[in-house]
Amino acid sequence: KNEVEQSPQNLTAQEGEFITINCSYSVGISALHWLQQHPGGGIVSLFMLSSGKKKHGRLIATINIQEKHSSLHITASHPRDSAVYICAAAYNTDKLIFGTGTRLQVFP
Amino acid sequence: KAGVTQTPRYLIKTRGQQVTLSCSPISGHRSVSWYQQTPGQGLQFLFEYFSETQRNKGNFPGRFSGRQFSNSRSEMNVSTLELGDSALYLCASSFASGGPLNTGELFFGEGSRLTVL
């Protein structure tokens, strides 16, 4: 069964803290997307991974194919990072399945 | 470079009506995918088009359909609207030929918020 499980559902942090959001999936994915959604609905693609690790500014995404697990890390978190973070697994069976999202709030 | 443009941004329909939503991708992008977002079901993949052909389809009834034109602009249509079709409909374009199911980074529009009364 193709599934995507994301944790935690909600996350609160103080400015400057290191944040980790986790995503687990079933076998047979061709890519894993990390998305950011701000209030109002706009979605921004943060990363698209099929292996290894990617870094963009304070954001780092990793994927472990053997463990079927991906993580999104935010270093030195800032209130502007407050958003919903969503992972999405692209399965070889031609399905794109989304996690339920992690609502992050960073307080100054 | 202009982003992905979706129209209309907001619309209200009544049950039984039909609706057509439009998506203009980033220039040069040939893959357009559509998504439905509701509070209860979250984000769900509707379908994806590449070079005017539907390549992939999610688990939605036949009332949901779409098409892509030669200029890569895409439309989706929902017929015989139901209350449960109220949602934010998002489209995304991708440059890579693999689209969202392979190696294509996604660029999202702002969405069309549909309310069915």
Image: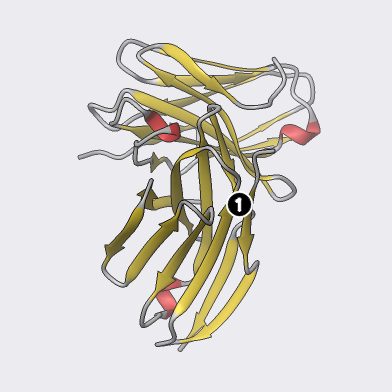
Residue B28 in the image: above or below residue B67:
below
Residue B117 seen in the current view: no
Position of the C terminus of chain A, as image quadrant, is bottom left
Q: In this view, does A97 lie to the left or right of B4?
A: right
Q: Looking at numbered disc 1 in the image, what kind of residue is underneath it?
A: Gly
Vertical arrangement, residue B56 with respect to residue A62, above or below: above
On the image, numbered disc 1 is attached to which residue? A99
Q: Where is residue B97 in the image (x, y as percent from the top left)?
A: 31, 25
Q: Looking at the picture, how far across and down is residue B103, in whole percent? A: 35, 36
Q: Identify the secondary structure beneath mark 1.
A: loop
- The x and y percentages for residue A41 are 52, 52
Relative to B30, is A4 on the left or the right? right
* Chain that bears disc 1: A
Residue drawn where x is 42% and y is 40% of the image: B109
What residue sits 49% from the left and 73% below the top?
A20
Image quadrant of residue B76?
top right
- Which residue is most to the front? A66
Residue farthest to the left, as pictured? B1
Q: Measured from the top left, where is residue A56 in percent x and y?
A: 27, 63
Q: Which of B80 and B52 is in front in this view?
A: B52
For mark 1, does the 10 Å Cα neighbourhood hold few (<14), some (14 to 19), or many (20 or more) residues? many
- Quadrant (top left, top right, bottom left, bottom right) of the N terminus of chain A: top right
Q: Which of A30 and B110 is in front in this view?
A: A30
Place residue B36 in its image quadrant: top right
Name the quadrant containing residue B25.
top left
Using the image as rendered, state which of residue A61 and residue B45 is in the foreground.
A61
- Above or below — where is A101 with respect to B61? below
Task: From this view, report whether residue B56 is shown above or below residue B7.
Answer: above
Q: Answer whether residue B52 is visible to the viewer in this image.
A: yes
